[in-house]
Amino acid sequence: MNKVTILIPVYNEVATLDKILKKVEDANFCGLEKEIIIIDDYSTDGTRDLYAQYPYKVLYHEHNQGKGAALRTGFKEATGDIIIIQDADLEYDPVDYEPLIKLIIDGKADVCYGSRLTGSKPSRSFMFHHLLGNKFLSLLTNILYGSTLTDMETCYKAFKAEFIKGIEIKSNRFDFEPEITAKVLKRGARLYELPISYYGREFAEGKKITWKDGIHAIIALIKYRFVD
């Protein structure tokens, strides 16, 4: 394996984009060549004015569609042997990706998730209802799919490209997470979890996911257990 594609969905992240790109540039990723693809989901806060200074591929949505739609756009353009997802905020540290990628390079995993809930790495205190929601969604995933995941909703997901590119993603918003998890589990992926650090944001700091997204996640987990 020679190349890793880093997909960065962006929506109104003018305050953090420079910082996260610097972190991605500095991270090692097991020495693989980096292909960085930014997918702008119709930012309106000045984020789009930053792109001219970056030497990366930038894909544009002409109206806001959601994280899932942005990633669907990015997957089509990815050319790496491994594909990973990096949010444009500062909640996750790119250095945590290297152990996940190594499992795929070593031929042990098709998919690897970074878990925020193992307690073995630094983690900012979750908002209580978010913590309960994350634990419930992981439990529901395990009941429906016979898995033992601790953090289904994690952003940090690494995929062997040849595995993930055979899966059609339909979700447009944050229900991407349960949909992709359902589909990789149903296809018998060798899925591993490793601990990662987490520096969560409050709503006042720009966090976007809400309780409504939790409802959509439940619907997606049940739906994709029986269809597609």
Image (cartoon, rainbow, N blue to C red):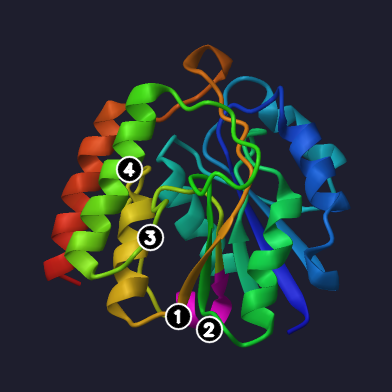
CA gap, disc 4 and disc 2: 30 Å
Q: Amino acid at mark 2?
A: Glu
Q: Main secondary structure of the magenta part?
A: helix
**Is disc 1 placed on a helix, strand or loop?**
loop
Distance in Å between CA atoms under marks 4 and 1: 22 Å
Mark found first going from the N terminus, 4 or 2: 4
Query: How far apart in space, not on screen, are marks 2 and 3 (Cα)?
Result: 23 Å
Residue found 28% across the figure and 47% down from its top:
137
Left or right side of 69 for 41 = right
Q: Identify the residue position indicated by label 3 in the image.
A: 149
Point out residue 40 in the picture as x, y percentages from the top left corner: 59, 41
Callout in the foreground (2, 3): 3
Q: Which residues are magenta?
A: 159-164
State the residue position of label 4: 135
Give the labeled residue for mark 2. Answer: 162
What secondary structure is found at the residue carrying circle 2? Answer: helix
Residue under label 1, please give it.
190
Of the numbered discs 2 and 3, the one sitting upstream in the chain is 3
Looking at the image, which residue is at 73% across and 84% down? Answer: 1
